[in-house]
Amino acid sequence: MAKTPDFTKTMQDMMANFPVDTSSMQDAFKSQSALNEKMAQAALSAAERSTEISAQWAKDTIARVGELTAQKDDPSAYAKAFTDFASASTESASEHLSAFAEVAKKLQMETVDLMMAAGKDMASDAQKTAEKATKQAQDTVKKATASTKS
């Protein structure tokens, strides 16, 4: 049977002749991880605040239902209690929906700020990488030119 040649050493030598700088990939990964962390914190903060608003709204409504269902001596008091409940519920809904809108607005602003900062960071990183690649290319050309003149 024929023995399959081992190309391990050949591949190692070939890869050693083409070094790859992975620092830019590591920096990009770190930048992306930091952005993801900040975005997650903003989303979690908004979710926490929304939950607080929902819980407060539910507590307010339950308290009003308790007042609505309390025994009354006069039949017209039930109508007044229901009218008061409907009026208070409408006002409460308006206040709580406004609070939800503020949470959404704040999250939107934070997201825009984070994305703009990330864009600036990416542009800066791309510029640095391009400058580094240009310098390396120039150095390589100089070396090649110097070796051909010798």
Image: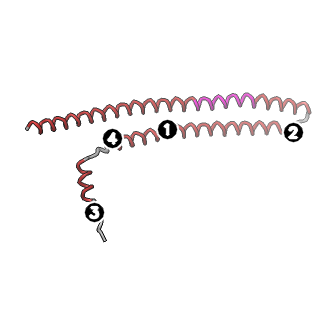
Residue at x 9% of width, y 36% of height: 149
Identify the secondary structure beneath mark 1: helix
Describe residue 51's horizontal placement relative to residue 33 as left or right. right
| Tag of residue 24 | 4
According to the picture, the residue beneath numbered tag 2 turns out to be 71
Amino acid at the residue labelled 4: Ser
Q: Earlier in the sequence, mark 4 or mark 2?
A: 4
Amino acid at the residue labelled 1: Met
Quarter location, residue 61:
top right
According to the picture, the residue beneath numbered tag 1 turns out to be 39
**Neighbourhood count class around disc 3 (C-alpha, 10 Å): few under 14, some 14–19, many 20 upward:** few
Q: Earlier in the sequence, mark 3 or mark 2?
A: 3
Residue 122 is situated, as x and y percent measured from the top left of the image, at 38, 33
According to the picture, the residue beneath numbered tag 3 turns out to be 6
Residue at x 83% of width, y 29% of height: 83
The span from disc 3 to disc 2 (Cα, nearest Å) is: 92 Å
Foreground: disc 3 or disc 2: 3
Residue 11 is situated, as x and y percent measured from the top left of the image, at 27, 55
Q: Nearer the viewer, residue 29 or 110?
A: 29
Foreground: disc 4 or disc 1: 4
Describe residue 131's horizontal placement relative to residue 58 as left or right. left
